[in-house]
Image: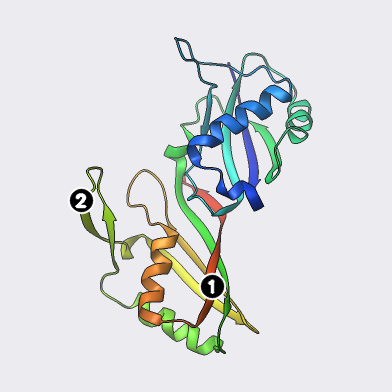
Amino acid sequence: MFRYRVIYAKEGPARYISHLDLLRVFDRAARRAGLPVAYTQGFNPHPKMSFAAPLSVGTEGEAEFADMELTRDIPVADMESALAGSMPQGLRLIGVSKAPEAAPALMAMVDRATYSARARLASPLQNEELAKAIEVFLARPQIIVERRGKAGEKKLYDIKPGIFAMSGSVNNDIIVIKADIKTGSSGNVRFEELLAAFLEESLLPLQGRFVLARTGLLFKRS
């Protein structure tokens, strides 16, 4: 089998495609492109594709990663050209490369992610006020959020160890919050729960909701 790494953006209407549906969307795009996709064996075969850390439904992704296995070796430029013309609206191909044969699964490689949230303000806010609110928020000894376990039970979780950086800016009536947070197989921080905890304390004068985007995925250093 031949393994290729695809970098793509998930924008506009495509941000509402769930992680579970993403495999089917990519499978259809690859078949439209005429790519020799490899499938699993058995009664219900699936395309041999894997994705990096899942995105929450409604969050855009500026540079997402997927690995795709093909049954024969084809030039990267040919695959990139064919796949780019077959992607549905909102999924934009950024690039394709050969994945190293010994490389671990994408989900095992991801360590951190950067995010951005953008919203309109209902009343004026100064950059200094926002910076102070973030400073006070990050100075808390713990940042506790509530999550539900697999059985539906509520659990409290401290996300502060997984927050590596957080900043904000205001330009006229637009506020932007950025964060660098833990993402991967353990210790994950969800950007939406970080924002919710911050808004609960800071009481920012928002008009409507934040529009969320994952701006980058960072891999573990070998």
Residue 148 is situated, as x and y percent measured from the top left of the image, at 27, 52
Residue situated in front as seen by the camera: 140 or 198? 198
Say the numbered circle drawn on residue 208.
1
Looking at the rendered structure, the secondary structure element under dot 1 is strand
Q: Is residue 146 above or below residue 132?
A: above
Residue at the spot 73% in from the left edge and 20% down from the top edge: 34
Nearer the observer, 19 or 35: 19
Residue 96 numbered mark, or none? none
Q: Residue beneath label 2, please? A: 153
Give the number of marks: 2
213 left or right of 107?
right
Alpha carbon distance from label 2 to label 1: 30 Å
Circles 2 and 1 in contact, beta carbons < 8 Å = no
Q: Tell me where residue 203 sits by quadrant.
A: bottom left
Residue 65 found in image quarter: top right
At label 1, the amino acid type is Gly
Dot 2: few (<14), some (14–19), or many (≥20) neighbours within 10 Å?
Answer: few
